[in-house]
Amino acid sequence: MDNISAMSKQQLNEVKIILTDIDDTLTTNGRLKSNAYSALENLSNSGFIVIPVTGRCAGWCDHIARMWPVNGVVGENGAFFFSYNHQAKKMQQTYCQTSKERKENHLALHDIKNSILKNVSGSALASDQDYRHTDLAIDFAEDVSLLSSEKIKDIVKIAENAGAIAKVSSIHVNCWIGSHNKLSTSLSTLDQVFGISKSNIQNEVLFIGDSPNDSMMFDYFAKSVGVANVMDFIDELNQPPKYITSKHSGEGFVELANFLLRR
């Protein structure tokens, strides 16, 4: 991995769209600090399209799409894309699954939840679970004492053995049923909503993240960046980012934003 300073002026000038993880990428110790929020606003005001791509719940994503200086949000690890039309005062929601599919999957995830909570001591439902539409989030670090790597692997194994997909973030194991993921929904959104062709994606799109559930994004995008704390998960990443910031978490995002704005 090279420091972001290794990116050429031409590479920077090509960037039009910034896809960003939220937890421990925009946030620091669970808080969205003013400098990270200002960095989002500065990027938006400078003409960048900014899209958070997160495992966070539909309830949070409704708020983010309405209130943050962003162009929309991919949520629940690719289950949907929300954007808010401020002129029409209308939330636009695009789901990867039908309402019927989501209801059926909810029942299956309920059984997986019970199995995990029964068999993995110390695990808990994520505090935002009530506001999720498509996935199950098991907390291993946010509002509980940090679980061991062995227990986190046990959570993943239970979910996968039951036929679900399970991805580890910096705080949760997100479990869902379906073929969608952060990358697939990001690509379809870039094409269908923002008209970015596959031939232009590698030049025009930059992704920044921090954890194992970002591996697919790190692998796909030529301009993929990890904030410095990505090194905490380096042994668990199937594919590391191409570039890395010097600073951790939200400070790393600010570092990247300032770098882009000075281009």
Image (cartoon, rainbow, N blue to C red):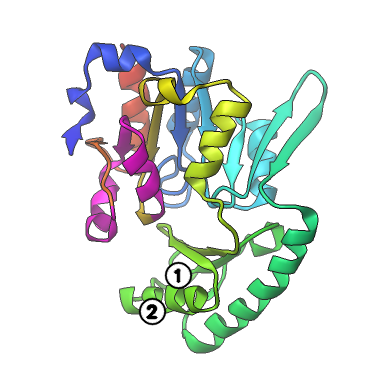
Name the amino acid type tagged 1: Phe
Q: Residue at the location (53% across, 69% down)?
A: 138
What is the quadrant of the C terminus in the image?
Answer: top left
Q: Which residue is mark 1?
A: 140
Q: Determine the residue positioned at 34% across, 36% down.
A: 251
Pinpoint residue 30: horizontal percent, then vertical percent.
47, 51
Residue that appears at 22% across and 60% down: 235
Between the residue at mark 2 and the residue at mark 1, the CA separation in whole angstroms equals 9 Å
Q: Nearer the viewer, residue 84 or 37?
A: 84
**Residue drawn where x is 18% and y is 39% of the image:** 1
Majority secondary structure of magenta residues: helix
Over which residues does the magenta segment extend?
213-238
Q: Identify the residue under disc 2.
A: 151
Label 2: which secondary element: helix
Tell us which disc is closer to us: 2 or 1. Answer: 2
Q: Are marks 2 and 1 in contact (CB under 8 Å)?
A: yes
Does the magenta portion include 207?
Answer: no
Q: Is residue 54 above or below residue 170?
A: above
| Magenta highlight on residue 215 | yes
Residue 56 image point, x, y percent? 57, 51
Query: Is 12 on the left or on the right of 111, as rendered?
Result: left
